[in-house]
Image (spheres, rainbow, N blue to C red):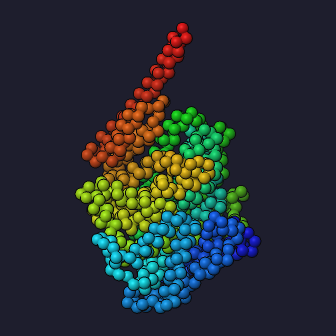
Amino acid sequence: MREIKGPIGVAIAGWLGTMAAVQFYFTGFGFPEPLKLASLHLMFAVPPIFLLYPAFKSSPRHRPSVFDAVFAVAAFLPSLYIYLDPNRVYDRSAFIDPPMLIETILGTIIVVLVLEAVRRALSIALSILTGVVILYMFVCHLLPGVWYYRDLPYGQIVDILYLMNGSGLYGQLTGISATIVAAFLVFGAFLQTSGMGRLFMNLGTFLAGRYKGGPAKVVVVESGLFGMTSGSSVANVVVTGSVTIPEMKRMGFPAAMAGGIEAAASVGGLIMPPMMGAAAFVMAEMISVPYVNIIAAAFIGAILYYLGIFVAVHFQSKRLGIASLPKHEIATWRDVLTDIHFVIPIAVLLTLMMMHFSPYFAAFWATIAVVLTAWLRKHTRMGPGKILSALVDAGRTICVIAVAVAAAGMITAALTNTGLLLAFTGIIKGLAGDSTFLLVVLVAASCLFLGMGVPTTPAYIITAAIGAPIIAEHGMAPLLSIHLFVLYFAVLADATPPVAAASYAAAAIAKANPMMTGFHAFRMAVGGFIVGLAFIYEPAITLNGTLYEIVTATAAISSGIVLISLGYVGYTDGRLPFWLRVILVAAGIACALYQGVPELYRALFGFALVAAVILGGRRYFAATAERQPSAELKNEA
């Protein structure tokens, strides 16, 4: 991203701050009609992308080019046309009334420019995926079998992507971005600008810094807390990783492992209640489930995810001989209390949500609470400069998410208005055959593939459109469990090679190989893969069951995650043999997911095996250490 200064930089900052302020005003005082809101949202959000993000590495780094300015103006006009005359969209009949020439031109321009904006600001993966889906609409009548669909004239493609009411660029997804997502991003920006990150850092060192492998355990706590407010795994890595990764390297962690730990912990912030990033708010809107129910259902899963990271970090630290943080670097309870007043805005948000106010209205008053709460302590007060900075940061993030969601809107419009969705589902069902387990695994793999290089919110939207209906059709789990399953795998795509945005960001900070960093992140996040599948097979972890079912299911999955973590780390008090590691991983998967044995028995077996490996290993390696000096003395004699 460019760092633009001078009059142009001031103008861009003013544009971004104004956009965020307008979005914030709407959350508290009411929104315009949906089509005007969506068009205003993209009218504000798309043009700055071309000014802030260079087209190529060789492009100017400190100023936009003439072509960037032309693209910015061109990106403004199609949304302005919709905003000024929404009745034109409301009154016409899609596929019957042909679009006017000006509408065809404007529709073509905005589609092409959104693809380019996504390429610049996010990744070429989402841009290519969207382009391929659009290309399908041009050639679908030429394809065989399940891929065939009737011939779509160019005007109808423009309808689907640009002019159809409730679909495409200005459809429901862009509306969600302009309401729930924007409100949450403004709230998160104010939290970060206020200095709440210091509270998370101090709390992390206070809770975990005194234990073995302290730096990495601090990362797990801090990234989980910060990630739920940032709404972006990459942003989480950049903000927290710039401090924690060098610290882990200083304490003895290899560079790639330090980056992998940070990436896995940062990704988990997006599934950590009570906020879970913007995707949870989108889920509430899409499946009409209260947000409070979603965070309650996700709580146990998030704890299990971080359990896997904690266990892996602990035994990796023992293997590497890494101790706790130095005493002077560990925060005291007084340090934590210095910023504890920032709990108030989160409490305000949750209280309003529990009172069944809308998410954006709750975010509005929670943001007000951030500013007011910051004035309780002198060192956290937010004056006009900090407030403006928070608005600009929020506006910058809203732009990136808006173009990503716009691309997701085009993908879902093409999926639902052609046979492409049926083609995907038919292929997955055909490959799965009669195996429901294989069906779930294929959907999970599809979610990982479609989530590559895509921010969490649009990744969840895209994968939910394809994956959720397939599983729901089989009645394998409640709808909420299915969508949590989809969310987990969309989130974990950020830590899964070969395209792992969070891992690549961590690798850049760690100065490590990106693929090796992604490999470590993938291993650290193994608990998330198990939990994601468990949402389908053990819906009791979403609190959907009796107390006995919830406890036994949680215990069985916990034992499985610990066994898997022990297996891939391969160390307790000494190096474990390869054959034992294979047995531990296989036993862990069985304990967590095998439905042929009751959860209680799986849990008892799993924890008994954990105890046997740890205690048995301790005795074995201690005995080996005692025999070794004796053998050395005999050799000397």
| Image location of residue 500, percent across then percent down | 50, 56
Residue 98 higher or lower than 336, as above or below: below
Q: Is residue 327 left or right of residue 297?
A: right
Residue 109 higher or lower than 525, as above or below: below
Which residue is pictured at 59% across the width and 48% down the height? 512
Residue 623 higher or lower than 377, as above or below: above
Which residue is pictured at 43% across the width and 67% down the height? 462
Between 514 and 309, the one nearer to me in the picture: 514
| Image location of residue 183, percent across then percent down | 55, 70
Q: Does residue 319 appear anywhere in the picture?
A: yes
| Image location of residue 266, percent across then percent down | 54, 53
Q: Residue extending furthest left? A: 434
The image quarter containing residue 231 is bottom right
Q: Residue extending furthest top? A: 637
Quadrant placement of the C terminus: top right
Q: Does residue 544 appear anywhere in the picture?
A: no
Residue 540 higher or lower than 578, as above or below: below
| Image location of residue 70, percent across then percent down | 63, 80
